[in-house]
Image: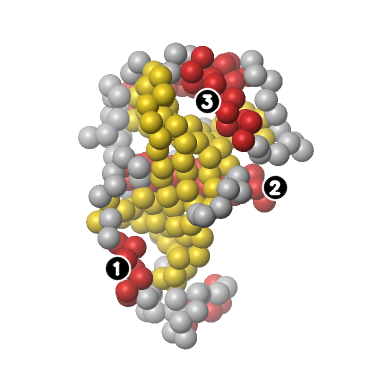
Amino acid sequence: MPPVKWLMHWHPSPGATLNTQILAEACGCAESLGGAKDGRWKTSIIFYRAMTRDGGAAGPAGQQGQQHGDLPRELLGVALHERPGLYFSIVRLAKLVLQADATFPQVMEKLQSYKARVALNFEGFQYQLGDFCLRIGKCVPNNSEVLRGIMMEVEYYPLSSIEKSRAIMEDFFDVWQETVAKKSLPGHFIHVESNFSEYGLSDQYSFQHTAVQYATCLQQLMAVVRG
């Protein structure tokens, strides 16, 4: 059973823009807390749209009758760095999270039920800090360096219970925020809790929890970009 993990994303101050200097400063904060760099990591997310009978991607909700059967109009695919053999699919409207083999995207392509519309990569460096593992990185479109967001994973190795680890994670987040604040950067990290119970997930942390957190984090990042 994997350890508990929190995802945080960078929220710029009003009028401020994202830049790679913020990412570099965040990595510097991890090192100033005693974090030892321990390689790179990468998680990928793909937005799928259901195909219409004429082979195009599904349009507005009013056109859903042209889709194959009762397929959900949108699907989110998540390939986690720590589980390369698995692939997670999220249907946000139905609150479903499914686990499949890593070949699932190829199966989707052959079935021609869904078309990949947008692919985003979360990638950066990993730091070991006592019982914690920090992964700090950027969100960029596939085959592009356009910065869409900055985020961080915090993993606490000793516990898999979300509730039992809450106080420890909150204390760590407070220390982290104080460290970042000393840099006087134009913004701050935010942790938005996912409603795991809506997806039928228990208190014991799993990789499905991570996939749901990425979906929540991505919504927040896109809101920042649009805003």
Q: Residue at x 22, y 35 (%)?
A: 1
Q: Of tags 1 and 2, which is closer to the observer?
A: 1
Q: What residue type is labelled 3?
A: Cys
**Mark 3: few, some, or many residues within 10 Å (few <14, many ≥20)?**
many
| Residue at (42, 62) in percent of width and height | 75
Q: Which of marks 1 and 2 is nearer the N terminus?
A: 1
Indicate left or right for 37 with 157 as reference. Answer: right
Q: Name the residue under label 1.
A: 107
Q: Is residue 33 left or right of residue 157?
A: right
Q: Distance between the residues labelled 3 and 1?
A: 38 Å
Secondary structure beneath label 1: helix
Place of residue 136 in the rendered image (x, y in percent of width and height, measured from the top left): 48, 32
Q: In x, y percent, where is residue 163?
A: 35, 27
Please name the amino acid that badge 1 sits on.
Val
Q: Residue furthest right?
A: 15
Would residue 166 be seen by someone viewing this image from the given angle?
A: no
Which residue bears the numbered disc 3?
27
The first of marks 3 and 1 along the sequence is: 3
Left-right relation of 170 to 177: left
| Numbered disc 2: secondary structure | loop
- Residue farthest bottom in this picture: 54
**For the point 50% across and 65% down, which residue is it?**
117
Q: Is residue 31 above or below residue 6?
A: above
Q: Which amino acid does label 2 sit on?
A: Gly
